[in-house]
Amino acid sequence: MLNTSAAAVGLLSVRRSPQFALSDDAAPRRVQTVLGPVAPERLGVTLTHEHAPLVDWSELFETRPAPIAPVREAMLTLSAKLLDAFHRSLSNSQGPGAVVETTPIRVGRYPQLLVDLARRTKVHLIASTGFWCEALAPQHPWAVRMSVQKGGVDQMAKLFVREITQGMEDPSGAWGEKFTEIKAGIIKIGTSTYLRPSERACHVAAAIASRETGCPITTHTTSGGGLEEAELLLKRGASAGKVIIGHQGHLDDRASEEADEYHRLIARLGCYVQFDRVGHKEYEVEKQARQIAKLIEGGFLKQVLASHDHVPYYCPNYAAEEKRAADWKIAEPDYTTVTTELVTSLRRLGVSPAEIRTILLENPQRALAFSAT
Ligand SMILES: [Zn+2]
């Protein structure tokens, strides 16, 4: 069904857009939202790892995605309501708020849907290029093909660069057949508990694309692996200030509940340490606050990020050949736990309002801004 030659995936025609200006230091650094570039200081509090409106792993199991059309309106309405609740939790000096939507290629990333959501909420939305990992499902077959083909890693890097500089792929076509003009603002990759070959290829491609565009990289980890991710990305030329190691706060070194030393090792490399499952049961808020306070004590305040990793709509029976609109599971996750409970816990531990502002506003601005728009 799918022809994966370079021409068929639309990668031979990749060209930098005329405005593309990586090494031009004079070029303004902007955060690339789905509605266009935004000055970083205009974001406000930024949740750096979320999903909205949906995640769908069907293509990882080589089945058709769950239908969107019958639930599209409800998805947009619910997601906008939840994101606006986050917006309302912010004071004027903290607003309007922004969310990094970390759903990568072909796992429920519908660029036009993200634009429609961004138009309905006061919160800025930043979309992701990149491929997910093999942690809880097979790697996407498109990524597998590129990870083993001769020159495939470069093709994958070109795909990421194209999505950042020209526009994201439209999943209504075959792989790489159609593209939108809606640009990604971050590269999402991940690892299983231990790094697998296809995941290594995705990391190398991400490092190449980040080096070429200045675009940040954000990662999924699975009970450990963050240090290996950081080391691999840096070895392949990514800039430490553009690498965000995610899902910290629970068994990060595969053994310790409070892996403070492990967090310090990642921070010492210059990367961001992201506590992005605030509000999840096994990632207790108090525990994550303690871990953040330890990083601050160690002098790494400017490398801490926080978020929830929430998703309102997901379709659990990914492997089923046929899916109906009724199969969607709908949740109403709270996107304000960071700005309420986590902030309260941090204050109790003596973290100052200025330090909290650094974590929630200034660090994301620095991490997300680049000059490839
Ligand atoms: Zn996630």
Image (cartoon, helix red, strand yellow):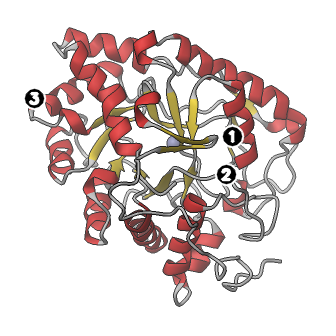
- Name the kind of residue labelled 1 in the image: Leu
Q: Quadrant of residue 36?
A: top right
* CA gap, disc 2 and disc 3: 40 Å
Residue under circle 3?
297
Contact flag, marks 2 and 1 (Cβ < 8 Å) = yes
Using the rendered image of the protein, determine whether residue 147 is visible from the camera's viewpoint.
yes
* CA gap, disc 2 and disc 1: 9 Å
Q: Earlier in the sequence, mark 2 or mark 3?
A: 2
Residue located 61% across and 53% down the image: 183
Residue 180 at x, y percent in the picture: 73, 57
Helix, strand or loop at mark 3: helix
**Above-or-below relation of 219 to 348:** below
Q: Is mark 2 within 8 Å of ligand 1?
A: no
**Above-or-below relation of 89 to 119:** above
**Residue toward you, 294 or 235:** 235
Q: Which mark is residue 182?
A: 2
Q: Earlier in the sequence, mark 1 or mark 3?
A: 1
Residue 328 at x, y percent in the picture: 77, 36
